[in-house]
Amino acid sequence: MPATDPAMGRRAFLRRAGTASAAVGATALVGVTGACASAVNPSRSKDASKGTTRRPGRSGPAAGHPRWSVLAGMLSGSLVLPGEAAYADSALLYNEVLSPSPAAVAYCATAVDVQRCVAFARAHGVRVAARSGGHSYAGYSSCPGLVVDVSSLNRVVVATDGRHATVGAGAQLIDVYSALASAGLLVPGGSCPTVGIAGLALGGGIGVFARAYGMTCDNIAALDIVTAEGSLRTCSPHSHSDLYWASQGGGGGNFGVVTSFTFTVHPIPAVTLFTLEWPWGAAASVLEAWLRWMPGTPHELWSNCQLASNGASGGGFLKVTGVFAGPTSACASALAPLLAAVGAAPTYQFVGPEDYMRAVLIEAGCEGMTVAQCHLPRNPGGTLSRSAFSAKSTFVNAPIPVAGSMALIDAVDALAADVPGVGGGIVFDGYGGVINQVPAAGTAFVHRDAIACAQYSVSYASAMPAPSVVAAARNWLGQTQSALAPYARGSYQNYIDPTLPDWAQAYYGSNLPRLRKVKGVYDPDDFFRFAQSVPLPA
């Protein structure tokens, strides 16, 4: 089989499941960046660590209707308002199920623009949402107030030492990878090409090189952030170290608006891609073998196990794919124990070398495209489309008993009947390696003992699915997550989930008290708030 038919990323997984592709998250999101949720009534109040609504924050004195023309005149960038030709596109988020209507969108050309937006919003009592790529699963990168969009802050500059790079907070992943690759370098990150770097990094950042080089958040050497009082602060292990720590996995939009990062970067290694397929009837044995195999694999290896619905035809589609940061021979040796444990021979097997950027495009669902084409149409030459989806996630810390595996397989079998006309399934992304060498308290990203993260996704055939279809999909997602609940814990903050009970504990675990303390220091008025933002100290 030729080297053009290798591993399948998340976009391709959902396309294989019979639907449009879905986002990785991340806020910036999904992750994945997030700030305030337009669907939440801020007048309602609940314990922020238990429910999905928040008490109202204090954003400064209200001063009547804001004079947007004044803000527009202060910006080096541009301000887009309802009724203007650019507004319809400017208001959009990646997830087509969401339909936000912000009062204004500020495209910030400089960090000073961000500061002026924060000052204006405080002076006029306007809610603020930070937006990088607009991929927040729950829409938290928009709000009824002012969207502070940093997508114009997208420069990528490699330092003279060759070990660091400064990346604007609005840079999209595919552009970051391309720019660094031209210097023979990489930073580990996600696969969805149009995700903004800010949300991804701030919430964690899992990707195909994470087991070899750590999460994206682990590679943040420093960052610049505009905090709630409008100050631009540089955070590092030696300056505002508590805010630096919180920004390494504490979630986008919680503590301010990041304008740039300095990342530790790594030389591009040899790259091997692999794909293994088995009949659907082997799903239980493959999943069990994969979960037992992953923890002992070399750090250079990353893999996922995909259980996708076959739609109306029934049954499912089973695939293990991955990337190895090294030669094909070493990859083949690492795969041998998995093949032996499964017992049954794969119906399809590919293991082969690949050029780094070509591998990135394949994982992004952009095989055969140029980097320019691997964008949404709002970018010149972009050919990708937005996606309509719902998702949930949880972390697996040990192999799953047969009863648990069968419950998940039965759920994938039932998806087409439970929610006709949709696609989707379950993806287990491998953790371990360098990820798990970081102590749980070493960064705000607490999930350092996981074997894998399971994401349950449903992708809709229509950009505006009927409410009954969305309700049925969410019911399927909830039931599927409940089936795994006895064997799993927590949830990934970059796959932010507006339906999740006890979300703060699920995202942040033992790091939640320290995150709340940091919130109290840098945002004591809860200016940066949304339905699932880090709550103030009790």
Image (cartoon, rainbow, N blue to C red):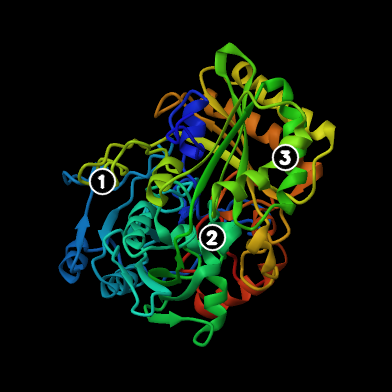
- What element does badge 3 sit on? helix
Q: Amino acid at mark 1?
A: Ala
User: What percent of the width, then of the height, locates residue 513?
Assistant: 68, 71
* Rendered location of residue 467, percent (x, y): 50, 26
Disc 2 secondary structure class: helix
Residue ID for mark 1:
372
What is the x, y in percent for residue 333? 67, 46
Element on which disc 1 rests: loop
Which is more N-terminal, label 3 or label 2? 2
- Asked if the residue under mark 3 is in contact with the one under mark 1, i.e. CB atoms within 8 Å, the reply is no
Q: Mark 2: few, some, or many residues within 10 Å (few <14, many ≥20)?
A: many
The residue drawn where x is 63% and y is 22% is: 316
Residue 93 in sight in this render: yes
Q: Residue at x 45, y 56 (%)?
A: 33
Question: Which three-letter amino acid code belongs to the residue tagged 3?
Answer: Leu
The residue at which mark 3 appears reads as 338
Outermost residue to the top? 313
User: Residue 178 occupies which quadrant of the picture?
Assistant: bottom left
Q: Label 2, on which residue?
A: 203
Q: Which mark is residue 450?
A: none
Task: Please tell me whether residue 126 is drawn above or below residue 223 in the rendered image.
Answer: above
Amino acid on which the number 2 mark rests in the picture: Gly
| Relative vertical location of residue 101 with respect to residue 244 in this rendering, above or below | above
Nearer to me, 96 or 270? 270
